[in-house]
Image: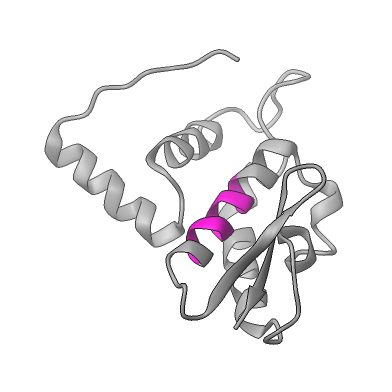
């Protein structure tokens, strides 16, 4: 997979990190997301991710559904976005999965990782 490397001053990187914490993305995922948003709306075949422009709304919906999820009921990331999940691209699904993983890991008093299902799918539970 091709890569693009970027250099930031310490002040620039701190600004990026602050935004990353707000949306629950790593700096790399945040940079990729914003780069894809700046591309033309009609990319060539195999180009930008479908749904990239909707990532903030998807992250917000993911967290909203997570907060409403009943305690004690196991879940995976796709169960929090059942209507949207089938139409999402693999990179968007990965980004949402990473955001959920960080949320769960960052709040062990509320969430617990139950294990990994076939296909490397993390299963969680709300405590």
User: Relative to the observer, which residue lies in front, 61 or 40?
Assistant: 61
On screen, 45 above or below 116?
A: above
Question: In what quadrant of the picture does the N terminus appear?
Answer: top right
Q: Residue furthest top?
A: 2
Specify the segment rendered in magenta.
Answer: 95-103
Q: Residue furthest front?
A: 115
x, y percentage for residue 50? 73, 38
On screen, 34 above or below 99?
A: above
On screen, 84 above or below 98?
A: below
x, y percentage for residue 89? 75, 39
- Identify which residue is drawn at 64% across, 43% down: 94
- Identify which residue is drawn at 48% across, 31% down: 35
x, y percentage for residue 43? 69, 24
2 part of magenta stretch: no
Q: How many marks?
A: 0
User: Relative to the observer, which residue lies in front, 48 or 30?
Assistant: 30
Q: Image quarter for residue 65?
A: bottom right
Q: Image quarter for residue 26?
A: top left
- Identify which residue is drawn at 76% across, 64% down: 81
User: Relative to the observer, which residue lies in front, 57 or 91?
Assistant: 91
x, y percentage for residue 13? 22, 39
Question: In what quadrant of the picture does the C terminus appear?
Answer: bottom right
- Identify which residue is drawn at 85% across, 63% down: 83
Left or right of 91 on screen, residue 13: left
Left or right of 106 on screen, residue 114: right
User: What is the basis of the colouring in this image?
Assistant: one colour
Per the picture, the main secondary structure of the magenta-coloured stretch is: helix
On screen, 46 above or below 67?
A: above
């Amino acid at each position: 997979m091709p890569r693009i490397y970027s250099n930031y001053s310490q002040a620039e990187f701190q600004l990026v990190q602050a935004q990353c914490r707000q949306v629950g993305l790593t700096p790399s995922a945040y940079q990729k997301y914003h780069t894809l948003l700046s591309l033309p709306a009609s990319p060539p075949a195999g180009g930008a991710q479908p749904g990239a422009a909707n990532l903030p709304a998807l992250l917000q919906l993911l967290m909203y559904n997570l907060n409403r999820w009943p305690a004690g009921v196991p879940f995976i990331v796709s169960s929090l976005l059942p209507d949207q999940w089938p139409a999402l691209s693999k990179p968007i699904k990965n980004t949402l999965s990473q955001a959920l993983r960080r949320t769960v890991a960052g709040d062990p008093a509320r969430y617990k990782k139950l294990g990994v299902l076939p296909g490397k799918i993390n299963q969680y539970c709300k405590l």
